[in-house]
Image: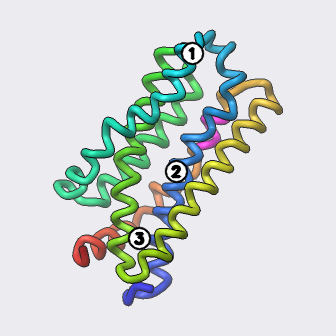
Amino acid sequence: MHSRGSARSLAFLALLTLGYTVYATDRYVLSAVLAVMVPSLQLSNGEVGLVTSAQYIGVLASVFAAGHLSDRYGRRGVLFSGVAVFTAFTWLMGFASDFTEAFVLRLASGVGEGIFWPVAMASVAGYFGQRKGAALGLFYVGFDVGAALGLSIGGLNASGTGGWDLAFFVGPLPGIPGMAWGGPVRVGVGAARREA
């Protein structure tokens, strides 16, 4: 691990992996509640397609700018902003009452994802240097954990209550302590930038 100590390195990796877990939870929770959401919001087939693709459109709209933003403003601020955006807009999704609101909220969530993902990956690779393969492997596990959580939370909500909104309130909750526990990112990202 990094010469500054394995505890600090693991804290840094755990924080970014948590962010990636919430990222995936936010992305997959929709598919688990879609069957319940469609009649609730009275979505047409075309609107279903747009709502489910909105997050990916948001990612495409922002992912290419993420590197430029991190070079100009620093990785820590960009990482924090990305997590804050996709956490907040996924949570707000629980209040959506029609197609337009659902589309805009999913689009905004995707913008946050597109900002977070490439900068987080670059931060992990830069910080761990020769050990980046193992570190990135652990980081990517966060996505699979998040996908399982999103599908499970959504499925339990839909089957247990017959609703869909609660899943969007619960799914992004780990993003809140993740943002609060931001101290290790200052060290980790700074180190990554010096070593890159």
State the residue position of label 3. 184
Secondary-structure class at tag 2 = helix
Amino acid carrying label 3: it is Pro
Camera-nearest residue between 75 and 68: 68
Count of labels in the image: 3
Crowd rating for badge 2 (residues with CA inside 10 Å; few <14, some 14–19, many 20+): many
Q: Which residues are magenta?
A: 167-171
Residue drawn at x 61%, y 33% is 30
Q: Residue at x 25, y 78 (%)?
A: 195
Residue 122 lies left or right of residue 70; in this view the side is right
Q: Are the residues flagged by discs 1 and 2 in contact, CB closer than 8 Å?
A: no
Measured as percent of width and height from the top left, residue 76 is found at: 31, 60
Q: Is residue 99 visible?
A: yes
The kind of residue tagged 2 is Gly
Q: Residue at x 65, y 17 (%)?
A: 38
Query: Sequence order check: which comes first, mark 1 or mark 3?
Result: 1
Residue holding disc 1: 97
Q: Which residue was labeled with disc 2?
A: 175
Name the quarter where the C terminus is drawn.
bottom left
What residue sits 39% from the left and 39% below the top?
59
Disc 1 is placed on an element classified as loop
